[in-house]
Amino acid sequence: MTEHGNASTYVNHGCRCQWCTAANTERGREQRRVRFASRRIVDGVLVAPVPQHRHGIANTYTNWGCRCAPCAGAHRRASRDRYWRRVAVTR
């Protein structure tokens, strides 16, 4: 029997009840808080301490809080693409 209200039940057993969903959401928020706290200022810009090959993607901007030029550009492109996909559907 799985115990509800745990992020591990959400991830490992695929339970989507409100308690497991809430626990998984909170775990994600906590992980993001820890990642954001690890950022450092480099040349006046907050940069995430991730491997170089992880810079320049929207995920690093969103989930790690990296504000370097490659990550910010990737976030802008992803946001613009989402906007145009949404506009295309409504027309």
Image: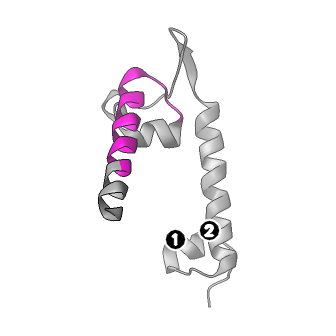
Q: Secondary structure at mark 1?
A: helix
Q: Is residue 41 above or below residue 29?
A: above
Q: Which residues are magenta?
A: 65-83
Residue that extends furthest to the front in the rendered view of this protein: 91
Residue 69 covered by magenta stretch: yes
User: Badge 1 is on which residue?
Assistant: 11
Q: Quadrant of residue 80?
A: top left
State whether residue 25 is above or below residue 58.
Answer: below
Residue lying at the far bottom in this picture: please name it. 1
The residue drawn where x is 67% and y is 69% is 22
Q: Amino acid at mark 2?
A: Ala
Examine the rendered structure and indicate whether residue 23 appears above or below residue 87: below
Secondary element under disc 2, as helix, strand or loop, is helix
Q: Marks 2 and 1: CB-CB under 8 Å?
A: yes
Q: Which is more toward the observer, 64 or 86?
A: 86
Q: Amino acid at mark 1?
A: Val
